[in-house]
Image (spheres, rainbow, N blue to C red):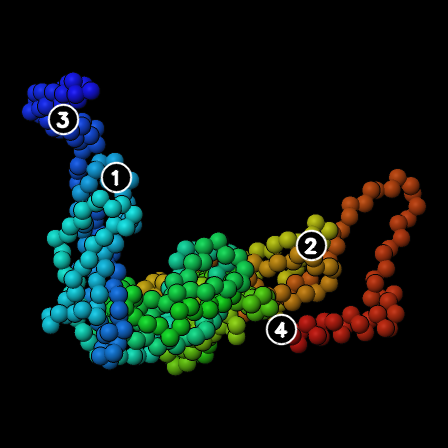
Amino acid sequence: MKIELSTTREMITNNLSLKILAGVLAVLVWIIVNNVNDPVTTKVFKNVTVTIENESAIEELDKVYEVKEGGVIDVKASGKRSILHRLQSSDIQAVADLSSLSMTNAAYIQLSCPKYEYVELQSDTKMLTIDLDDEKTDQYKVDVTTEGSLPDGYALGEIRMRPNLIKVSGAESQIERVSEVRVTLDVSNMTGDFLKNLKPQAYDANGKLMDSSRLKFSSEKVRVSVSVYETKTVPILVEATGTPAKNYHLISVDYEPQSVTITGTESALEKCDFIHISCPINGANGNIETEFALSEYLPSGVKVVDSVESINVKVTISAQKLQTVHIPISDITIKNLSEEYEAAFVSGTDTIAVEAIWANAGNTSSITASDLGAYIDCKDLKEGLHKLEVKFVVGDSVLIENTSYVKVRLSEKEKEKEEETTNEPVEATENPMLTATPEEKSEEIQSEVELQEES
């Protein structure tokens, strides 16, 4: 028994130093192998948001705060590669406790990673600093900004909001920067009335969106109801009314635009086929250039879709001398006369007098009958005596200042008669007036008198 114990002791103590060295080397090899397969490395996570705790500590001071520095930081994480491979920015917690503010209004930022224990976190930004300010509240009207576009043929109608006034509270320095409160309305592809709840946002005087995280709105949502109407394009008619000064004449009325697109309720659009504007020229002795606001000439319930608010009008008034042109009756062309009839002028004079001026105020030459192209239209007229207005083919070159009439008698054309080969005498044709009854004679005479009186 003693021999066995002695042998065991010798086995353990024999070359003891070498055995200890081998054990140490084994541990080192294990560490080296592990580090080779899963080494320690680093990874930077940018823009980690710092969570602020115990804000009530500031409220107890009757103050509000604004983060000056340290609200968002970059964090460097160190640990095994296998862990960092799975580590995400959301796994990192950065917390600043406002109940432990320093004299310089700074709070230490504590970093932690509860999900992975063996991760070391560091950041170059150690402190969160804030500015303390008095709280202020102001009231603002809510404006609507639209984005997107409606389909062709549709336009926005009335927009209603509830509430349309909102109180905004925050640091006095921030509230003083607020210029307006808006909601953004997306109208893409809308063809009918719709309703949306939108978040109000604050903007500065330059129209830049402000950070609203430290602002409190009296209403977190604005209820916006929108009407969508169909559109309609209508012409604009500008009419010169009145008479220019003596010896002056109206040449033309020019204006732009000549049509606009309008929108409104269905019933309102049905009643609006054009927009009529009267431009007074009484006593005018020169050109008139003026502007008319379209909104004043639109019916109730209708508005202009285009960005056109007014129409520019130019009225040309000329001191050009009025010319009297004598046109021979024989120079008047007869148009659209039925092949069954022939026409003859019935007039006590050989000419008609036409008063005209050149549309081009700078033209001083004489106007001749050939410049006017006078004609009468006999379309659909039957046999008998007619009083017709003389019309002219002048285009835009000449302005006719008076209206002229002529009397024309239409009668059936005489038919060619075949000569009879018989020796029987041909009966004489009776005069209709001789064989007519007294009533028929009276009607014919009365018709002649009426036409003479009209002329």
CB within 8 Å, label 3 to label 4: no
Image height of 297 relative to 112, above or below: below
Of callouts 2 and 1, the N-terminal one: 1
Taking the spot 24% from the left edge, 74% from the top edge, the residue there is: 57
Q: Is residue 160 left or right of residue 31?
A: right
SS for tag 4? loop
Taking the spot 21% from the left edge, 49% from the top edge, the residue there is: 46
Residue 129 visible at all: yes
Of callouts 3 and 2, the N-terminal one: 3
Which of discs 1 and 3 lies nearer the camera? The answer is: 3
Q: CA distance from mark 1 to mark 3?
A: 29 Å
Determine which residue is flagged by label 1: 83
Q: Nearer the viewer, residue 316 or 115?
A: 115
Question: For residue 293, what is the image quadrant?
Answer: bottom left
Of callouts 4 and 2, the N-terminal one: 2
Of callouts 1 and 4, the N-terminal one: 1
Of callouts 1 and 3, the N-terminal one: 3
Q: Nearer the viewer, residue 69 or 175?
A: 69
Determine which residue is flagged by label 2: 342
- Quarter of the rendering occupied by the N terminus: top left
Residue type, numbered disc 4? Ser
Image coordinates for residue 18, horizontal then vertical, percent: 8, 22
Determine which residue is flagged by label 3: 23
SS for tag 3? helix
Taking the spot 10% from the left edge, 26% from the top edge, the residue there is: 20
Residue type, numbered disc 1? Ile
CB within 8 Å, label 3 to label 2: no
Residue type, numbered disc 3? Gly
CB within 8 Å, label 4 to label 2: no
Taking the spot 62% from the left edge, 65% from the top edge, the residue there is: 388
Determine which residue is flagged by label 4: 455
